[in-house]
Amino acid sequence: MSRICIKRQHAPYFILDRFRNKKITGRDIVEILSYYNNMYGDYFNTSPKTSVCSDQIILPILTSGIDLEKLMKEIPGNEYKIRNISSFLNFLDKNKIKNINYFHNKDHKKIFYSEGYDKVIPENFGLEKFEEGQAVIFNRYFLEGPFKGKEQRTNVHIGVISKVEYNKIKYLSMVTSRSSEIPYNTRIMATLETNFQYWYDGLRREYTGSDETKFALTYRTLAILDMTKIINDLKDKELK
């Protein structure tokens, strides 16, 4: 293992040569995330605000030895852009890395009315199966009021599938709150075993207490990213 100098726009991370020098699998991604499990943000003596949701996809990329900051230098944004989901998707699109599978082909009306865990099945993303290491992106919609059914925030959250059971997502690795009280803004940390059904149906089906709006909000799956293909494509890109 080789240590590197951590810049403040990155999450704390290390590079492992055995991942740098191989094709990455979904199981590798989950293993990498296990090294950062329970990370509050004080890991390596950093700020408590260091951990953000996108670190779940960025950390496997960085740990694999990919210089993502260099690859994304032409993408507009501030110094934190490599941790911004929208900037990352923009980067993938500009580089024709097409491994994004949208829920109901990104039809937002269908997405809004496809409520609940039972609707999160591979077929609704045009997939045959869910796999460990795939990332799940979420949108947030107005659940009530004059904007009901409209997007309140795009690409609002992301997690990585850490366990599949009977072709359903059992656990996600994500940065989330371990608080049991709304608005879930305390005890935020990385956890490898977020119970997806409980989080999605029990905590995020009707979300209140946002400081962004007085109306109730609801989370929906937006897309599945094939992170194994993305990481391996990025490795190939660095070699060119």
Image (cartoon, rainbow, N blue to C red):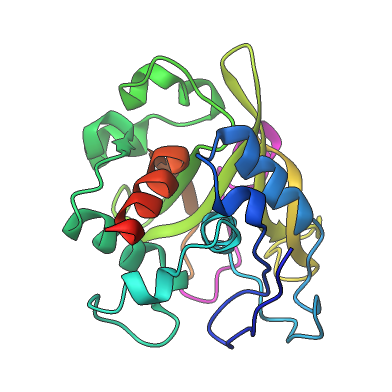
Residue ID at (51%, 52%) = 158
Task: Identify the magenta region.
Answer: 197-213
Residue at image coords 39%, 39%: 229
Q: Is residue 27 magenta?
A: no
Residue 46 lies, with reference to residue 134, above or below; the image says below
Q: Nearer the viewer, residue 75 or 135?
A: 75
Q: Please give the name of the residue rendered at 71% of the width and 61% of the height, measured from the top-left corner.
A: 182
Looking at the rendered image, the quarter that the N terminus falls into is: bottom right
Screen quadrant of the C terminus: bottom left
Number of numbered labels in the structure image: 0
180 with respect to 169 (left or right) = right
Left-right relation of 5 to 131:
right
Q: Quadrant of residue 64?
A: bottom right
* Residue 156 percent coordinates (x, y): 45, 60
Residue situated in front as seen by the camera: 226 or 212? 226
From this view, report whether residue 108 is shown above or below residue 151.
above
Q: Is residue 106 visible?
A: yes
Image point (54%, 26%), residue name = 131
Q: Is residue 214 left or right of residue 222?
A: right
Q: Nearer the viewer, residue 176 or 220?
A: 176
Q: Is residue 207 magenta?
A: yes
Provide residue 234's location: percent of width, then percent of height.
37, 54
**Farthest residue, direction top:** 166
Residue 152 visible? The answer is no
Residue 106 place in picture, x, y as percent: 24, 39
Q: Quadrant of residue 181?
A: bottom right
Q: Is residue 205 left or right of residue 190?
A: left
Give how far across and how far down residue 166 sits, in percent: 63, 11
- 214 and 196: which is toward the camera: 196
